[in-house]
Image (cartoon, helix red, strand yellow):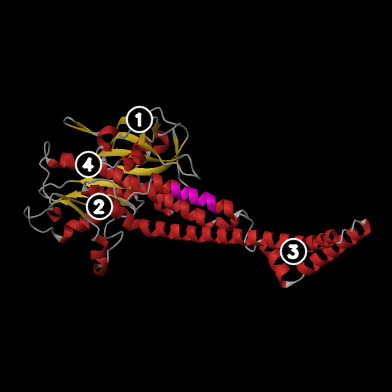
C-alpha cells in the first residue's frame, strides 16, 4: 500500500535526492533507471534535473499492527500561489487484511480497523521539521490521503482468479478491484447494478495476470492468478506498482492540483481593478503549467499512459484545462478590446483638444497677427470649442473609452 497526501515544505529535506530506489534482484529503480522509462519532459516533472531536484527519499523501518513502513518520499509541487506545496508518499507493506485498512484510511466507519496514519505512522511526526501536513484549506479532491493498493490472491481467493490463462474474468473480480480502489464495501456504497459497468469501464488490463483501476480517491492493482511466492512475476508487478505506475499517478495528482489552482485564479480575475495585469499573470501561469506538467503521453510503454488517462477521466482534467484555455482567451480578448478602445479614446481626445487650438493658431499665422490679445481670444475660443465638443455624443464616447467600462488596465 502506498499513501499520498499533501504537505507544505518547511525546508529542503536533508534526505537522499531522487525517488525511493526499490530493488529486485539486480534491478534498482532509482531516478536514472526510471528516467529511461518516461519521456524526458515527464521525467523532469517527476524527478527534477541537474542541480534542481524535485524529489527526496528516506528509508525507514517502522512496524506496528501488521503494517510496515519501509520508506518516505517528498515530491515538490510548487505553484505560483503555493511555492511550498509538496506531496508526501508513504510506502507500506501490509501483513493483515488490506481492505479494512483502506476503509479506515478513507474515513469509513469501522469497528475493526483504526485510522492507520496515527501513532508511529502519524505523518506530522514522521515529517517533523521538514513539512507540515495540510489538514485544512485544501480542496475536496485532496482532503483525504490518496491510496494505491497492490494485492495478489491465494488459491482460496477464487472471485479474483481466472479459471484459465485465456478465460474471461469472473464478474466478482472487478467488483473486488473496485472495492480496493474506492476503499469501500457494498455496505459503504452499494453500486447500482444499472451503472456497475460504467463504474468499471476504465479498468486497465495490464496483462492476463493482473488489472488496475483508477478512481478519484484511490487506485488498486489486483492479480488474477495465485501468487506462488518468491520468484513469482508478481514481485516485478509490485515493483512497477510502487515505481513507474505510481509516478504516472503522481503526475496526474500534480496536474489536478495545478488545474484546481488555475480554476480558482480564473474566478478571481475581476477582483482587482488591474485587469490586464491579472490576465497577463494568469496567461503566464498557464504557460508554465503547460510547459512543466501538462502531459497526456508519458512513455512508449502502454500501462503508465493508460493509468494517467484513467486518472484524467476521473477528474475530467482535459476538459477542465480546455475550459481554462477558452476562458483565459476570452479575458485576453477583453483586455485587447479595452486597450484598443482606450487608445482610440486617447486619439479622439487629442483630436478634440488639438483641432480647435490648431485651427485658431493657424488662422493667426496666416493673417500674420502677432497681437497678444488676439492670441488670448483664440485660446479662449479654442477652450470653449473643446468644451462644447466634449458635450456631444462623440465627446462623451471618447471620455467613456478613456475611463474604461470594466476595469482599469
Among the 4 quarters of the image, the one containing residue 196: bottom left
How far across and down, in percent of the image, does residue 192 sit? 27, 67
Res. 211 in view: yes
Marks 1,3: beta carbons within 8 A = no
The residue at which mark 3 appears reads as 352
First along the sequence among labels 2 and 4: 4
Q: Nearer the viewer, mark 1 or mark 3?
A: 3
* Residue pictured at 49% horizontal, 48% vertical: 284
* Residue pictured at 58% horizontal, 54% vertical: 276
Among the 4 quarters of the image, the one containing residue 227: top left
The residue at which mark 1 appears reads as 17
Per the model, the C-alpha gap separating discs 2 and 4 is 14 Å
The residue at which mark 4 appears reads as 240
Q: Nearer the viewer, mark 2 or mark 4?
A: 2
Q: Is disc 2 placed on a helix, strand or loop?
A: helix
* Residue pictured at 28% horizontal, 46% vertical: 298
In the image, which residues are magenta? 279-287
Per the model, the C-alpha gap separating discs 2 and 3 is 64 Å
Q: Quadrant of the N terminus?
A: top left
The residue at which mark 2 appears reads as 306
Res. 97 in view: no
Amino acid at each position: 500500500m502506498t499513501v499520498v497526501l499533501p504537505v507544505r515544505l518547511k525546508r529542503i529535506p536533508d534526505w537522499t535526492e531522487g525517488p525511493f530506489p526499490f530493488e529486485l534482484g539486480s534491478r534498482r529503480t532509482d531516478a536514472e533507471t526510471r528516467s529511461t522509462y518516461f519521456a524526458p519532459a515527464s521525467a523532469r516533472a517527476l524527478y527534477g534535473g541537474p542541480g534542481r531536484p524535485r524529489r527526496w527519499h528516506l528509508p525507514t523501518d517502522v512496524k506496528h499492527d501488521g503494517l510496515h513502513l519501509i520508506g518516505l518520499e517528498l515530491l515538490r509541487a510548487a505553484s505560483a500561489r503555493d511555492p511550498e506545496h509538496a506531496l508526501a508518499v508513504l510506502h507500506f507493506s501490509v501483513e493483515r487484511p488490506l481492505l479494512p485498512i483502506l476503509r479506515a484510511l478513507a474515513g469509513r466507519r469501522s469497528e475493526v480497523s483504526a485510522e492507520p496514519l496515527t501513532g508511529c505512522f502519524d505523518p506530522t511526526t514522521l515529517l517533523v521539521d521538514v513539512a507540515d501536513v495540510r489538514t485544512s484549506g485544501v480542496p475536496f479532491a485532496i482532503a483525504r490521503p490518496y491510496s494505491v493498493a497492490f494485492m495478489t490472491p491465494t488459491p482460496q481467493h477464487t472471485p479474483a482468479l481466472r479459471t484459465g490463462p485465456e478465460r474471461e474474468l469472473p464478474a466478482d473480480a472487478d467488483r473486488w478491484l473496485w472495492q480496493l480502489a474506492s476503499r469501500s464495501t457494498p455496505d459503504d456504497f452499494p453500486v447500482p447494478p444499472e451503472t456497475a459497468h460504467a463504474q468499471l469501464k476504465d479498468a486497465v488490463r495490464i496483462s492476463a495476470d493482473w488489472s488496475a483501476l483508477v478512481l478519484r480517491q484511490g487506485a488498486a492493482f489486483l492479480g488474477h492468478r495465485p501468487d506462488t511466492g518468491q520468484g513469482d512475476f508478481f514481485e516485478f508487478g509490485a515493483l512497477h506498482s510502487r515505481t513507474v505506475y505510481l509516478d504516472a499517478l503522481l503526475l496526474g495528482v500534480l496536474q489536478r492540483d495545478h488545474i484546481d489552482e488555475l480554476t480558482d485564479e480564473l474566478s478571481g480575475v475581476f477582483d482587482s481593478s488591474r485587469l490586464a495585469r491579472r490576465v497577463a499573470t494568469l496567461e503566464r501561469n498557464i504557460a508554465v503549467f503547460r510547459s512543466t506538467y501538462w502531459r497526456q503521453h508519458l512513455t512508449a510503454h502502454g500501462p503508465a499512459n493508460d493509468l494517467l488517462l484513467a486518472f484524467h477521466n476521473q477528474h475530467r482534467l482535459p476538459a477542465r484545462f480546455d475550459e481554462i484555455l477558452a476562458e483565459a482567451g476570452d479575458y485576453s480578448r477583453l483586455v485587447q478590446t479595452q486597450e484598443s478602445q482606450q487608445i482610440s479614446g486617447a486619439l479622439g481626445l487629442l483630436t478634440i483638444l488639438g483641432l480647435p487650438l490648431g485651427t485658431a493658431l493657424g488662422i493667426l499665422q496666416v493673417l500674420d497677427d502677432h497681437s497678444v490679445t488676439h492670441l488670448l481670444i483664440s485660446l479662449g475660443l479654442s477652450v470653449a470649442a473643446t468644451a462644447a465638443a466634449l458635450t456631444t455624443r462623440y465627446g462623451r464616447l471618447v471620455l467613456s473609452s478613456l475611463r474604461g467600462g470594466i476595469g482599469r488596465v
